[in-house]
C-alpha cells in the first residue's frame, strides 16, 4: 500500500550531503570527466547529426563545416549530459545502475561538474554560432534547454517525461541539416519524426527492465504506475506502429530511394514485431529483445538513407 501511495504522487527526494571525494590519479579523473558526457549517447547523437548534415549538403560536403558541426554539437551534448548528472546526483545515488557515476561515487565534486558542463555547453554553442551558422546554434541551444531544464526535472514529476525527452532526443539530425543548409524544411522534420517515434519502444523497454531501480530513485516512469505492464506494452506497440509509415516518409519527399523504402519497411516491421511481442507478453525477456531490436533499427535505417538517397 505504501508503494502504491508513493508512486501515485511526485516523489520528493531529500538532498543528500556531498559525498566524500575519492583520491584519484590524473588518468582516473580524466575518465570521470569523460563519463560525465555519457559517451555512448554522444556517439549516437553525432551519428544522427552527421546523417542530417550529409543528406542536406547541397553538392559536395564541406568537410570543415561538418567537423565544426560535430565538435560543436558534441560539446553541447556533453555539457547537457553533465548537467543532467548534476541535477540527478541524489537520485543517481539511490539507483544501482547509476550509483557509480562520477558525482554520487565521489569521483568528482559538484562544483567541478558545474564548471565542466557549463564550459562544454558554452564552447559548443560558440563553435556552432561562429563556425557554422546561427540556425544550427539555435537548434542546439533549444536541445540543451529542453533536455536539462525541462525533461530532467519532469522525470521526478510525471510519466510524460518520456514524451518530452523524446523531443531533444530527436533534434540532432535537425542540427545537422541546419548546419549544412542554413535553413529548415520538411526534410529534417521527417528525420526528426523517425528518431522521435523510435525512442518510445526503446525507452519503455529500458524503463520496464529497470523499473525497480527507477522506483528507488524516485523517477516517474510508466512501468512504475503500470505493474502488469499492459499500458507500457500498448504504448510501445502503438509508437512502433506509427513509426512504420513514418520511416517511409523520406522516400515520399525525395530523401530516400526505392531500396531505402523497402529496407525501411522491413526494419519497421521487425521493430513492430518485437513491440507486439512485448505488448502481448510484457516481461524482462521480451523487453530485452525489443531493446536489441531498437539498437538495430536506428543505425540501419540511417545507413540505408546514406546508401540509397533519392536520385
Image (tube, grey):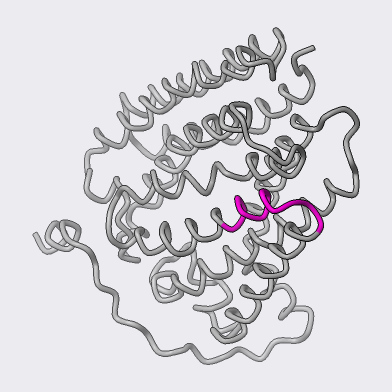
The residue drawn where x is 78% and y is 84% is: 26
Residue 215 is situated, as x and y percent measured from the top left of the image, at 30, 60
The residue drawn where x is 64% and y is 9% is: 262
289, above or below 73, in the image: above
> 156 left or right of 294?
left
The mark tally for this picture is 0
Residue 12 is situated, as x and y percent measured from the top left of the image, at 25, 72
> 252 left or right of 226?
right
Dividing the image into 4 quarters, which one contains the C terminus?
A: top right
The residue drawn where x is 47% and y is 44% is: 166
| 135 magenta-colored | yes
Q: Which range is magenta? A: 131-141
Q: Residue 17 occupies which quadrant of the picture?
A: bottom left
> 69 left or right of 97?
right
134 vs 214, nearest the viewer: 134
98 vs 139, nearest the viewer: 139
The residue drawn where x is 58% and y is 19% is: 267
Q: Residue 251 occupies which quadrant of the picture?
A: top right
Residue 109 is situated, as x and y percent measured from the top left of the image, at 57, 86
| 206 magenta-colored | no
276, above or below 266, in the image: below
Overall secondary structure of the magenta section: helix
295, above or below 126, in the image: above
Residue 243 is situated, as x and y percent measured from the top left of the image, at 48, 24
Dividing the image into 4 quarters, which one contains the N terminus?
A: bottom left
Amino acid at each position: 500500500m505504501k508503494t502504491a501511495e508513493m508512486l501515485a504522487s511526485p516523489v520528493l527526494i531529500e538532498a543528500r550531503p556531498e559525498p566524500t571525494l575519492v583520491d584519484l590519479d590524473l588518468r582516473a579523473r580524466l575518465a570521470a570527466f569523460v563519463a560525465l558526457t555519457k559517451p555512448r549517447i554522444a556517439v549516437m547523437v553525432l551519428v544522427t547529426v552527421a546523417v542530417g548534415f550529409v543528406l542536406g549538403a547541397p553538392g559536395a560536403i564541406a568537410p570543415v563545416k561538418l567537423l565544426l558541426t560535430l565538435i560543436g554539437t558534441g560539446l553541447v551534448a556533453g555539457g547537457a549530459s553533465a548537467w543532467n548528472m548534476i541535477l540527478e546526483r541524489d537520485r543517481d545515488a539511490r539507483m544501482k545502475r547509476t550509483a557509480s557515476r562520477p558525482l554520487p561515487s565521489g569521483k568528482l565534486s559538484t562544483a567541478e561538474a558545474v564548471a565542466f558542463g557549463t564550459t562544454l555547453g558554452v564552447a559548443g554553442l560558440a563553435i556552432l554560432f561562429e563556425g557554422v551558422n546561427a540556425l544550427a546554434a539555435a537548434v542546439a541551444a533549444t536541445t540543451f534547454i529542453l533536455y536539462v531544464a525541462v525533461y530532467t526535472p519532469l522525470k521526478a514529476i510525471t510519466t510524460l517525461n518520456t514524451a518530452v525527452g523524446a523531443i531533444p532526443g530527436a533534434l540532432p539530425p535537425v542540427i545537422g541539416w541546419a548546419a549544412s543548409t542554413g535553413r529548415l524544411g520538411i526534410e529534417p522534420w521527417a528525420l526528426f519524426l523517425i528518431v522521435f517515434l523510435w525512442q518510445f519502444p526503446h525507452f519503455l523497454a529500458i524503463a520496464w527492465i529497470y523499473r525497480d531501480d527507477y522506483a528507488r530513485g524516485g523517477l516517474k516512469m510508466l512501468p512504475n504506475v503500470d505493474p502488469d505492464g499492459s499500458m507500457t506494452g500498448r504504448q510501445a506497440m502503438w509508437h512502433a506502429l506509427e513509426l512504420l509509415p513514418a520511416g517511409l516518409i523520406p522516400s515520399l519527399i525525395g530523401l530516400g530511394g526505392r531500396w531505402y523504402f523497402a529496407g525501411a519497411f522491413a526494419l519497421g516491421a521487425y521493430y513492430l514485431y518485437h513491440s507486439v511481442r512485448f505488448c502481448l507478453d510484457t516481461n524482462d525477456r521480451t523487453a530485452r529483445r525489443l531493446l536489441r531490436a531498437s539498437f538495430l533499427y536506428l543505425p540501419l535505417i540511417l545507413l540505408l538513407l546514406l546508401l540509397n538517397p533519392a536520385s
